[in-house]
Amino acid sequence: MTLSERDQKYNWHPYTQHKTAQSHIAIVKGEGALLWDEKGKEYIDAIASWWVNPFGHSNEFIANAIYTQLTTLEHVLFGGFTHEPAVLLSEKLMEILPQNQEKLFYSDNGSTSVEIAIKVAMQFFFNKGIKKTKIIAFENAFHGDTFGAMAASGISFFVEAFKDSMIEVTRIPVPVKGLEKHSFEALENLVKTNEYAAFIFEPLVLGAVGMVMYEATALDQLISICKEHQVFTIADEVMTGFGKTGKNFACDYLQELPDMMCLSKALTGGTIPMAITSFTQKIFDGFYDDDVNKALFHGHTFTANPTGCAAALASLTLLRTPEMQANLVRVNENHLAFQNKIKQHPKVVTTRVLGVIFALEIKTDGAASYYGSLRNKLYDFFIENGLVLRPVGNIVYILPPYIITDLQLQKVYQVVEEALEIV
Ligand SMILES: *Cc1c(COP(=O)(O)O)cnc(C)c1O
C-alpha cells in the first residue's frame, strides 16, 4: 500500500470533507521551494506550506540550530524557570518589533496567540472593575479556529455551528478603496458605547479570505479612533509577520502603533509550532499587582519551548541577512512584472501585490464559493502541473518561500496564466 492509501485509515485532515475529498498526496522530501511526493513527482510549494516557510524546506542552518538545542536542553517548563533561547529570542525580537512593544507571552500556534490577546484585553478591564467584554473585528477576517479566535473570525461557514456559544464580536467593513468612510463610521459608532475591550485586525492583508488588501493610512485612522476611546488594538500578524509584506511586520507601514501583536507561522521558519503575543508595558501593568488574582492565569505545557526558540533565533538571523532582504525585493519585483502582464487579461477582474504576496481574481458568472467547483478545478489543475496553490473561491494567490528562484517563479506564473484558459 502507498502512504497515501495507508493515510486514509486513521488520519482526519484539516478543512476536509472526507467523503468527497481525493486521497492526500504523500510528501517524502522537501528542499528549498520544492517538494517531492512518494511517486517522485516534483511540486513547487508556491504558498510556503500555508505561509510558514520563508527560507525553504529542510533548511540546514535552522536544522543545525534545532539539533544543537535538542542535544543541549530540549525542553524545560517555563513556569518558575527560564532559559537562554527564550531570553535571547525576546531580546532579538525587541530589536525589530514596533518600539511600544515591551512584553512577550509565548504559546504554540496562531490561534493561541489570538486567544491570549483577547483574554488579556478582557481581563485588563476586568482587573480594573470596568465592564468591557466585547470585541470588534473585520468582516471576513480570519484569526484561527479555537473558540475565541473563531469568534473573531468572520468567514461564516467556518463558524456557523458554534455561533451561539461564542464571545460577543461585532464586525466592521474592511476599509478597502472606496469603503474607508463606512469602516471608520462603523468603528466610531461601536467604540462610543464603551462596551468594547479591543479591535482585532489582520494588518494590510486579510489572508484566508483571499489576500484582500487595504491601505496603511486607513488602518492608522482606525487605530487612532480606538486610541481615543481606550479600546485596545490587536494586530494579528500571524500571516503578515517576518517579511511577507516586504517589511518585517505589516505594522512597520503604520504611523500609529498597535497595543498587541500576534506572531506565529513564519516565526520558526516553518519548522516547529510556536507563537508569541506581544504587549505594551501599560497592558502588562494592568496585571501587575499584590493581588494574585489579577495575574494572567494562562499557560501552555510547551510554552517557550527551547527548541522552538532556537529555531526562531536561527530564522531571525536568516531573515536579517542582506541576501534574504534582497530576496524579498526580488520576489516583489517579479510579482509586479507578472501583475503588469496579466492584469489586462480578459478573465482577470483585479490583481493585488504587497511584498511577496500576489493575488488575482478570476471573472466568474455567479458567486464562487470558498471550496466550490471552480476552486476545485483550479486546485486540481495546479497539482497536475506540479504547483502547490490553494485558490480561495475565484481568487488565486501566490505566497512563495523567499528563496524561490526566478525560474521557479516564472513556472508558477506560466501555470497560473494557463489556468485562466481552463476556467
Ligand atoms: C493562520 C492564521 C491564524 C491561525 O494560526 P494557526 O497556527 O493555524 O492556529 C490566525 N491569524 C491569522 C491572520 C492567520 O493567518
Image (cartoon, grey):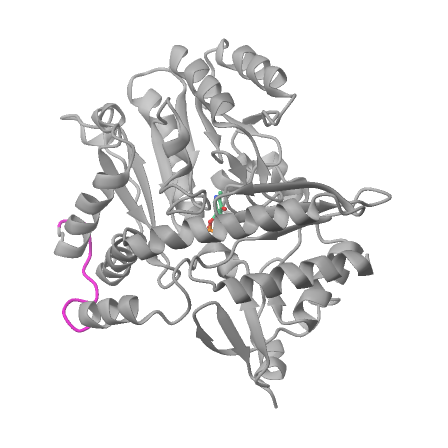
* Farthest bottom residue in view: 1
Please say whether residue 179 is one of the residues in the magenta stretch.
Answer: no
Query: Residue 345 vs residue 167: left or right?
Result: right
278 vs 334, nearest the viewer: 334
Which of the 4 image quarters holds residue 21? Answer: bottom right
338 vs 47, nearest the viewer: 338
Instruction: State the predominant SS element of the stretch in magenta.
Output: loop
Query: Residue 302 vs residue 28: left or right?
Result: left
Please say whether residue 79 is one of the residues in the magenta stretch.
Answer: yes
Residue 67 % position (x, y): 23, 72
278 vs 75, nearest the viewer: 278
Which of the 4 image quarters holds residue 155? Answer: top right
Q: Determine if residue 118 is in view.
A: no
Query: Residue 240 vs residue 99: left or right?
Result: right
Residue 183 % position (x, y): 59, 19
Residue 247 % position (x, y): 38, 41
Count of numbered circles on the image: 0
108 vs 398, nearest the viewer: 398
Region rendered in magenta: 71-80
Residue 144 % position (x, y): 50, 45
**Where the N terminus falls, by quadrant?**
bottom right
Residue appearing at x 62%, y 77% in the figure: 8
**Where the C terminus falls, by quadrant?**
bottom right
Residue appearing at x 49%, y 40% in the figure: 149
Residue 380, compared with residue 156, is above or below; it is below
